Image: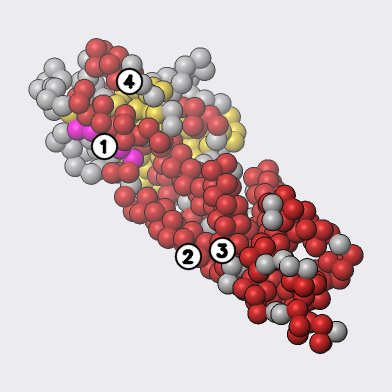
Amino acid sequence: MQKSTIWALGNRLFYSEQAEQRHARPAVRVALLGVMISVAVMLLTVFVVLGFKRTVTEQVAGFSSHIQVVNFDNNNTYELRDISPSDTLLQRLQSVEHVVYADPFVTKPGILKTQDSFQGVVLKGMPLFQADRPSAWDFFRHNLREGSMPDSVGDVLLSKTLHRLLQVGVGESLLCYFVGDDVRVRRYHVCGIYETGFEDFDRAFLLTPIDGLRQLNGWDSTRCSGIEIRVDDVNHLEEVDERVFFITANRFDSDGNAFFVQNLLDKNPQIFMWLDLLDMNVVIIFILMLCVSGFSMISGLLILILDSVPFIGTMKALGMDNRTLRKIFLVEAFMLVGRGVLWGNLIGCGLMCIQYFTHLIPLDAATYYVGYVPVLFSFWGWLLVNFAAVTVSMLVLLLPSALVTRISPAQVLRFE
């Protein structure tokens, strides 16, 4: 029998008046509900995990950039030994494909003190903010909650976390003590307050123009703690990291210091190991939801076949073979799966849109590094979920569809 005829019979069987009664059976409705919930849960799982990965990665990159070039002799502290990169080196790094900017930075640990409280922080100095060029300031400008960006060496951006701890607001001043061979103190003016939701970093970092920290360290305008490099897409991170390594390998600055290249995965392994564990959760949820969808459809198809025994007997009496009958019922089951997948998509994508625009579901930022459940739509993720749901559901239906071969016309007529 031609495929068009099989599809026509499957359509007729699915949309007939008797079909509405069969589809209203509790077992069939449960099957439809199982597919719908499975698809919605899998879509939300993919969107949330991708959202977590992108948001946390961008938060970490906002504070430490994607790639850093520092002194080879450094240890893992914020009191970095200085380097003196040449303008030629900075220009070569800036010209690497997928690099957004390559800027010097300075970090300096200090202690903030007010009349009632004190807090250890890390001051990070960056080239003075310019609205017409990309820089590390763009991340903090996006997360600015009050005030304005720094425009002089005495200005600082304070996080909302430190604002609550120290009770210091925009327009006020605070003292910062720097402990080394001697104790030095500087007064800073709070020009703005930022909030990223990344509690660990918000509590630690204070942002200021780089020239003030250079003066504090007694460095000239060529010296810095390192060079931070941002890429346009984290998917290009390894490629850019390799090119930066070859540019800086076996090169030395004017003082004979060698360079060391590290990316955000190297600097924050515990965070990205946690993110990698989320992939295992996705696999487990996928397996469970596909099992729910598959077993639900098995019970639904069995009910559809049992309710269509007279139709099966009549078709066999007219000479239709078992293989064709199985295809007809698989077509009907495919349409039922399609209905469940459609509703699952509407629910999953709808909930994703609500969360994306409203941030309705909050999270503990101290635990999850973000204050709300982040979501990210991925066309390929969406396609994978739908393809997996339809394919697995139809494959598991091949076995119960064999029940059609056990029904004989003689038994049906005798029963009638």
Quarter of the picture holding the N terminus: bottom right
Residue indicated by mark 1: 262
Tell me if label 4 and label 2 are in contact, CB under 8 Å: no
Residue indicated by mark 3: 395
Residue closest to the eye, 50 or 308: 308
Q: Using the rendered image of the protein, determine whether residue 278 is visible from the camera's viewpoint.
A: yes
Looking at marks 3 and 1 on the same chain, the residue that comes earlier in the sequence is marked by: 1
Looking at the image, the residue that sits furthest to the top is: 88
Residue indicated by mark 2: 284
Q: Using the rendered image of the protein, determine whether residue 203 is visible from the camera's viewpoint.
A: no
Please rate how many residues cluster around mark 2, counting C-alpha atoms within 10 Å: few if below 14, some from 14 to 19, many from 20: few
Q: How far apart are the two marked residues, 1 and 4, measured between alpha carbons?
A: 16 Å
Please rate how many residues cluster around mark 1, counting C-alpha atoms within 10 Å: few if below 14, some from 14 to 19, many from 20: some
Chosen colour scheme: secondary structure
Q: Residue at x 23, y 44 (%)?
A: 76
Looking at marks 3 and 4 on the same chain, the residue that comes earlier in the sequence is marked by: 4
Q: Residue at x 47, y 65 (%)?
A: 284
Q: Dot 3 lies on which element?
A: helix
Indicate whether residue 263 is drawn in magenta: yes
Looking at the image, the residue that sits furthest to the bottom is: 414
Q: Which residues are magenta?
A: 260-264
Q: What type is the residue that disc 3 sits on?
A: Leu
When asked about the image quadrant of residue 412, the answer is bottom right
Q: How far apart are the two marked residues, 2 and 3, measured between alpha carbons?
A: 20 Å
Looking at the image, the residue that sits furthest to the left is: 256
Residue indicated by mark 4: 96
Tell me if label 2 and label 3 are in contact, CB under 8 Å: no
Residue closest to the eye, 116 or 254: 254
